[in-house]
Image (cartoon, rainbow, N blue to C red):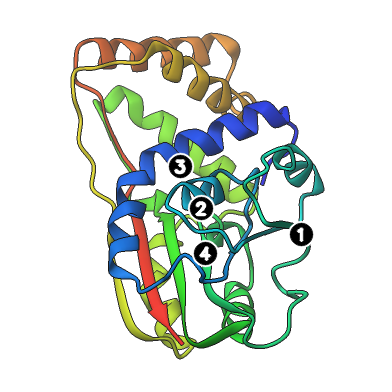
């Protein structure tokens, strides 16, 4: 994942993602038989925003693992996390049967080969442990409307692929879980709704990220025009941006 941005900006993006997917998390937690004593590992925890939400749900045996030490240092002041570990998801520093659940959130699209991550998560789970992919996008199925905004998705998808993202990670979740022997698999797509409420703050924040992706491919003048078209579409309540985001649950 691109790391040249300031940590507080990256954390803000993680917060936006976590806020957007919170209704889904609340729904999924009702479907999974975890107790407050369950030991839960998030692989690729970033700055800990998902673990914070689990803490708010009453879970206390939380472990966050990330290969990026800077993310963990940023998360460290949050006293609600039981444990933070600088480690590699391909080689988890835990014995077999340590956890009741392993979580992923906007993570599997960034790893390859992804099967090895799933196998390693299965190794550290107890019998009847559960793997939960909370959100994995499918950028190739993205919808941008009106037509003058579609160039944004074309260039951003190209930039994501160059950065190592699997643009079709979401659609592969169910197959990924099944091929690695997980049972009772459930999956779906996170719902989307649009209103006439428009946050200029969030718009500008997201465009700061977009500009990083667009700059190698377009001039400042072209980027400014795209941003103006995007802004106008939101103001006129015409803008549709839909990136299908999949979830999946599977038991060992």
Whole-percent x and y of residue 47? 65, 43
Q: Earlier in the sequence, mark 4 or mark 3?
A: 3
Dot 4 and dot 3 residues touching (CB under 8 Å): no
The correct choice, above or below, for 142 with respect to 94 in the image is: above
| Mark 4 element type | strand
Q: Which residue is mark 2?
A: 106
Write down the quadrant of residue 8 in the picture: top right
| Mark 2 element type | loop
Whole-percent x and y of residue 19? 41, 37
Q: Earlier in the sequence, mark 2 or mark 3?
A: 3
Q: Residues within 10 Å of mark 2 (few under 14, many from 20)?
A: many
Dot 2 and dot 3 residues touching (CB under 8 Å): no
Q: Residue at x 37, y 68 (%)?
A: 248
Q: Which residue is mark 4?
A: 103
Q: CA distance from mark 1 to mark 2?
A: 19 Å
Q: CA distance from mark 3 to mark 1?
A: 21 Å
Q: Which residue is mark 3?
A: 18
Q: Residue at x 39, y 9 (%)?
A: 228
**Disc 3 vs disc 1: which is toward the camera?**
1
**Disc 2 vs disc 3: which is toward the camera?**
3
Instruction: Please tell me which residue lies in front, 93 or 240.
Output: 93
Q: CA distance from mark 2 to mark 4?
A: 10 Å
Q: CA distance from mark 4 to mark 1?
A: 15 Å
Question: Horizontally, is 69 left or right of 39 in the view?
Answer: right
Instruction: Please tell me which residue lies in front, 172 or 103.
Output: 103
Q: Residue at x 63, y 33 (%)?
A: 10
């Amino acid at each position: 994942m691109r790391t040249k941005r300031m940590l507080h900006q990256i954390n803000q993006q993680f917060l936006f993602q976590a806020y957007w997917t919170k209704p889904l998390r609340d729904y999924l937690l009702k479907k999974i038989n975890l107790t407050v004593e369950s030991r839960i590992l998030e692989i690729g925890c970033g700055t800990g925003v998902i673990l914070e939400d689990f803490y708010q749900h009453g879970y206390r045996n939380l472990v966050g693992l990330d290969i990026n030490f800077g993310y963990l240092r940023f998360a460290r002041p949050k006293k609600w996390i039981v444990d933070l570990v600088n480690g590699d998801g391909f080689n988890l520093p835990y014995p077999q049967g340590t956890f009741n659940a392993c979580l992923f959130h906007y993570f599997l699209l960034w790893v390859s080969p992804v099967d090895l991550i799933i196998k390693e998560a299965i190794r550290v789970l107890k019998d009847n442990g559960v793997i939960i992919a909370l959100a994995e996008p499918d950028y190739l199925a993205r919808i941008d409307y009106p037509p003058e905004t579609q160039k944004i998705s074309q260039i951003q998808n190209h930039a994501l692929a160059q950065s190592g993202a699997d643009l079709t990670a979401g659609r592969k979740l169910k197959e990924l879980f099944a091929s690695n022997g997980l049972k009772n698999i459930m999956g779906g797509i996170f719902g989307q709704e649009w209103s006439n409420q428009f946050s200029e703050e969030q718009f500008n924040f997201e465009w700061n990220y977009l500009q990083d992706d667009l700059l190698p491919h377009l001039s400042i003048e072209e980027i400014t025009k795209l941003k103006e078209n995007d802004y106008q579409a939101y103001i006129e309540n015409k803008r549709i941006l839909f990136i299908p985001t999949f979830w999946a649950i599977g038991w060992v």
